[in-house]
Amino acid sequence: MPATGQARDVLSYERRLWGQGLAHVAGVDEVGRGPLAGPVVAAAVILGKGVAIDGAADSKALTRRDREEVAEEIRGRALAVSLGAASVSEIDRFNILRATTRAMNRALNRLAVRPDHVIVDGLPVQGLAWKHDAVIGGDGLVHSVSCASIVAKVCRDRLMCALGCRYPAYGWERNKGYATRQHRGAVRESGITPHHRTTFGMLQLELPFETGDV
């Protein structure tokens, strides 16, 4: 255990795997499982041995501006970075869990460097085509997963902001598709768009309001 005041080694999980001869460790995370609109997006990041990204933490703990800046540094310094997504139609057809797995597999398959091992946030992912460790809270505990969470969120947020310009009533540039009061009110007044997940109870409006924008 580190002495009081000593900084935690953010690469401790990766170092253990590097020490086992697994040079290319990919952290994977997704964003967008809970919203009522938009795709689910996954990112995969492989860091070179000893490479730590200043400021990289769980994406939810960073401001939008910080995420944008850190995402650029990750892209510039990581050994490999890739993205994968599953569309709204896939979410409605397969369910959100299976669609998320598809997005993760796509991200991993697009890496320019083949992973020797994979780490995911949360529970083991059934259907993931790669041997992996599952770490609950991994987006805040495993550095490569933290990096993946940032890259994925920046990508999806940019997409939802662009869609928000096309559908201004729903406030997607602020709520990113989550069930905020504005979003739910816009659905009542204007109906749903092709980017809404119809299997999420949208038409019945059974989900409770979120208390604030995301």
Image (spheres, rainbow, N blue to C red):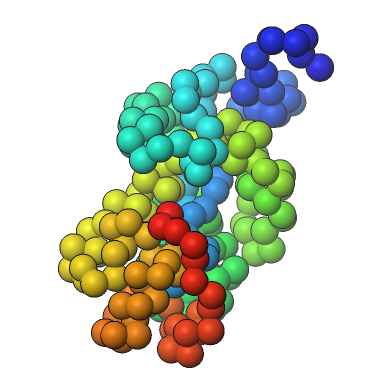
Residue 14, given in percent of the width and then of the height, sits at: 65, 27
Q: Residue at x 53, y 57 (%)?
A: 105
Q: Residue furthest right?
A: 1
Give left or right: position of 85 versus 139. left
Give left or right: position of 125 versus 205. right
Q: Residue at x 40, y 70 (%)?
A: 181
Q: Residue 129: in sight, yes or no?
A: yes
- Is residue 49 shown above or below 146? above
In this orientation, which residue lies closer to the viewer: 67 or 63? 63
In this orientation, which residue lies closer to the viewer: 59 or 114? 59
- Is residue 176 shown above or below 74? below
Q: Residue at x 39, y 76 (%)?
A: 184
In this orientation, which residue lies closer to the viewer: 46 or 88? 88
Which quarter shows the N terminus?
A: top right
Which quarter shows the C terminus?
A: bottom left
Residue 84, given in percent of the width and then of the height, sits at: 43, 55
Residue 62, given in percent of the width and then of the height, sits at: 45, 36
Residue 70, given in percent of the width and then of the height, sits at: 39, 30
The quadrant in which residue 69 appears is top left
